[in-house]
Amino acid sequence: MELKDKRVTVIGYGKTGEACIKTLIKLGAKVKLSEKKRELNLPDGIEVELGGHTEEFVLDSDLIILSPGVRWDEPVLEKARSKGIEVISEIELAYRLTDVPIIAITGTNGKTTTTSLTAHILSTEKDVKLVGNIGIPFIGEVLDSKPEYFVLEVSSFQLQGTKLFRPKIGVLLNIASDHLNWHNSMEDYIEAKKKLFINQREEDILIYNRDDRNVVEAVAIARSRRISFSFNNDSDIYTDGNHIRFKYPEFSEISIPLKGIRLTGRHNLANIMCASMIGLLCGISLENLVGAIESFTPYPHTLERFLECDGLTFIDDSKATNPHATISALRSIPDNKVIIMGGQDKGMNFEELVDELKGSNVRHICLIGETKVKLEELFLRNGIRNFSVHNSLEEAVMTAIDSAQKGDYILFSPACASFDMFKNYADRGEKFKEIVYKWKDSRDNKV
């Protein structure tokens, strides 16, 4: 892709925008930055507008690159496309600048765990780079890295701005209601996810969830070689509860024992199935594959059991930013529990979560955040009375502890985004831990 002397405008700064700018400068582009913030420390040698995205500035471009936090349907971008100016995401730009095979993983939930586990498995025998939505901009690695594989976590925001993107192996874990304050509808959200495989050819591979109706319907148009995973034995990859097994012809004699793994919960079995299949397809030995799965440490803020105290087990699942993720968390803990949930409203449907709460041994529910009123009304309409509403996370944690009995789990699984009260899900999870440890210290001092 020839970018020398091309006028390239990056929309949105942040970590990804910064990586785009550095790469574009190396390629000799005439780089511009449009950012809504009014104050930034920026590198020299680029043309900048702060405080908004004006037509005069943005439309004076040969190419426009979007950071993940910028909406695809911004009016100035619609105008740019109508004038024939190409608008793409950072993922698309990175794809055009590398010939390294890409393993791309997406889904409403489980992306980070599956991507990290896949890279962990492959790194036992291969040179791999972990990039993407996991916090390492893909564009920042393509010029200086030549691994055997890029292992890429990719979100619907990033996929929406792709055109030619074609991973060698794609994984579609699940599709559930999420980001509907960003995508105009569930249909638009699914269309963005389809861009994972829309350009794949017969020689490429798509691993997909046969238990997810939205996924099955979406992948029906795929031209790539499809490999299904499921909790039923009618798929190419499945589990019998003790082993992961394969009906895929090349690996039908292989089974992977589940004893000794650190990842817990049914949803993580799906993540392990996908990562295992990728490992086998890439030639990883069974010994190294099993060893990598057993040694893999769960990602922070994802069903993270961080403290047992006074007969209570505390779990930080702050990364659960949608109802589907919280449903998975509830199903992974069959014992009695108290749950703290709520946060920023992304326009999601909570009906399925309500049904799950009614049958999941939930002793009490503590509601916080922007969605607390919406959830309170929904609970009352559905006959749920064992809940309380709180103005702060600390207040909710104290109520959760008071409501719990010895042997219970206290689960922080918000089912919502974090930006109403916190910087991000990680900040939210750390605040939860701080409150719990503060309670523990005060309790210990009284003993």
Image (spheres, rainbow, N blue to C red):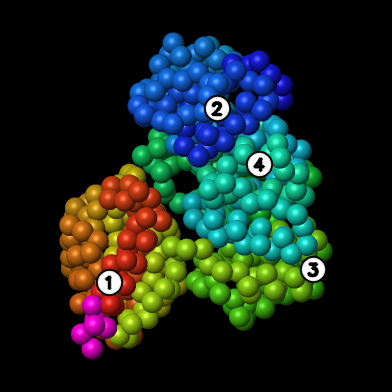
The amino acid at mark 1 is Lys
Using the numbered discs, state the Cα–Cα distance from disc 4 to disc 3 in whole angstroms: 27 Å
Using the numbered discs, state the Cα–Cα distance from disc 1 to disc 4 in whole angstroms: 40 Å
**Residue count near mark 3 (Cα–Cα under 10 Å), binned few <14, some 14–19, many ≥20:** some
Residue drawn at x 19%, y 65% as measured from the top left: 395
Q: Secondary structure at mark 2?
A: strand
Using the numbered discs, state the Cα–Cα distance from disc 3 to disc 1 in whole angstroms: 46 Å
Main SS category, magenta section: helix
The amino acid at mark 4 is Glu
Pointer 1 residue: 438
Pointer 4 residue: 141
Q: Which mark is residue 65?
A: 2
**Residue count near mark 4 (Cα–Cα under 10 Å), binned few <14, some 14–19, many ≥20:** many
Using the numbered discs, state the Cα–Cα distance from disc 2 to disc 3 in whole angstroms: 40 Å
Residue drawn at x 62%, y 39% as measured from the top left: 140
Q: Secondary structure at mark 3?
A: loop
Of the 4 image quadrants, the one containing the C terminus is: bottom left
Query: Which mark is first along the chain, 2 or 1?
Result: 2
